[in-house]
Image (cartoon, rainbow, N blue to C red):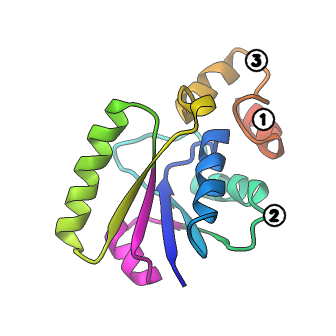
Amino acid sequence: MIRAVYPGSFDPITLGHLDIIKRSLSIFDELIVCVMVNSGKSTLFTIEERLEMIRKTVTQYPNVKIESSQELLVDFMNRMDAKIVVKGLRAVSDYEWELQMALVNKKLAPNIETLLMPASEEYTYLSSSIVKEVANYGVNLEAFVPNEIIDDILKKM
């Protein structure tokens, strides 16, 4: 069984994240979507809220597991017996950061590989920050996030 981890803040999960999840499932037997705690980021949603929003959007995928972690990604991966990190790339700036993180992870845990998956063209502009910004102005969120979580976002705004 090939198990991969898709880490992120998912604050909130977007259609771009969901696209990476679906595409990863065509490659791996199991995908763990892990809400990571990043001390450098302030979030709108609590960890519990983010986990619940992800659960709502992936119910049709039995081979997706949802977890959270406050530890180093490589420590989480070793604990989960996962060897592959999946990261989505929207732009060159994402590549520079994700390459640096992949090299650090490789140094810390040589058994871990990173798959950098380019975003599908229709989601290259999309980020959780964009979602929060447009939600503040009452924009219809259907083009940005899964329908299952629109009410959760609007309640929080």
Marked residue nearer the N-terminal end (3 or 2)? 2
Residue 153 colored magenta?
no
Label 2: which secondary element: loop
* CA gap, disc 3 and disc 1: 12 Å
Which residue is pictured at 24% across the width and 74% down the height?
A: 109
* Res 134 → quadrant: top right
Residue 74 part of the magenta-drawn span? yes
How many angstroms separate mark 1 from mark 2 (CA)? 25 Å
Please, what secondary structure does the residue beneath circle 1 have? helix
* Residue of label 3: 138
> Mark 3 or 1, which is nearer the eye?
3
Q: What residue is pinned by disc 1?
A: 155
Residue 117 in the image: x percent, y percent? 46, 49
In the rendered image of this protein, does residue 139 appear above or below residue 126?
above
Judging by the rendered image, the residue that carries numbered circle 2 is 60
- Magenta stretch in the rendered image: 68-87
Marks 3 and 2 sit apart, C-alpha to C-alpha, by 29 Å
